[in-house]
Image (cartoon, rainbow, N blue to C red):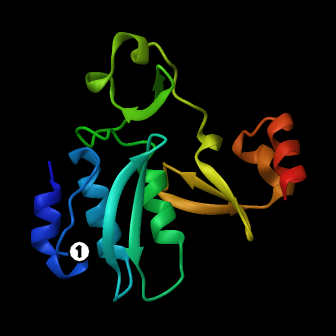
Amino acid sequence: MMTFDDVTARRPDQFVPSFKPECGQGWAQIVGRLLDEASDGFRIQAVSQKMGALRIEADRADEDMRPLMLAEFRSRVTCEECGKAGHMRTLDGWKRCRCDDHSTDEERAQPPRPAWTIGRLTSEGFAWYDPTADAIEIVSLAHLEQIGMPADQIERLKSAS
């Protein structure tokens, strides 16, 4: 398994000198991929977990948020502890992404969340993560049912936009 030490050793110029990850080693591979895909001038200040997903604070040479969004969405299907496939689980009000091996019995009993939950409303439409294609797809509000989003959720998004 790739660790944050591996990632920082491979690309030391893309991390602030005081960098210390505040999340599990399972997400190091996601950060490594982000750096492979990011533009020149991309420098990571901090990496943490918030509401069960990867959060990255970075200086960027451009304002394209898609690489950061893709890293966050990947973390929602990757165990924070080991990097294997996982899903979002909730325990005592805390959200985290874990595989079955790193989950409690109570968490293992929770079914995976529907794929349509991995996304966010943007100015372009609904940015949805397709884990099969490992890509973000922009879905118009008129076509959200195609990704399995229930009608009540679609109405909430439409009223929020």
Tell me the residue at 36%/43% (across/down).
78
Q: Out of 62 and 94, give the one closest to the viewer.
A: 94
Residue tagged 1: 15
Q: Residues within 10 Å of mark 1 (few under 14, many from 20)?
A: some
Query: Residue lying furthest front in this view?
Result: 18
17 sits left or right of 125 in the view: left
Residue 45 screen position, x and y as percent:
32, 70
Tell me the residue at 42%/82% (across/down).
60
**53, above or below 121, in the image:** above
Which quadrant of the figure has residue 8? bottom left
Residue 129 screen position, x and y as percent:
56, 53
Tell me the residue at 33%/30% (across/down).
99
Residue 150 screen position, x and y as percent:
79, 35
Whether residue 101 can be seen here: yes
144 sits left or right of 113 in the view: right
Which quadrant of the figure has residue 125? bottom right
Tell me how many marks there are: 1
Q: Out of 52 and 28, give the one closest to the viewer.
A: 52
Q: Quadrant of the C terminus?
A: bottom right
Tell me the residue at 38%/84% (across/down).
39
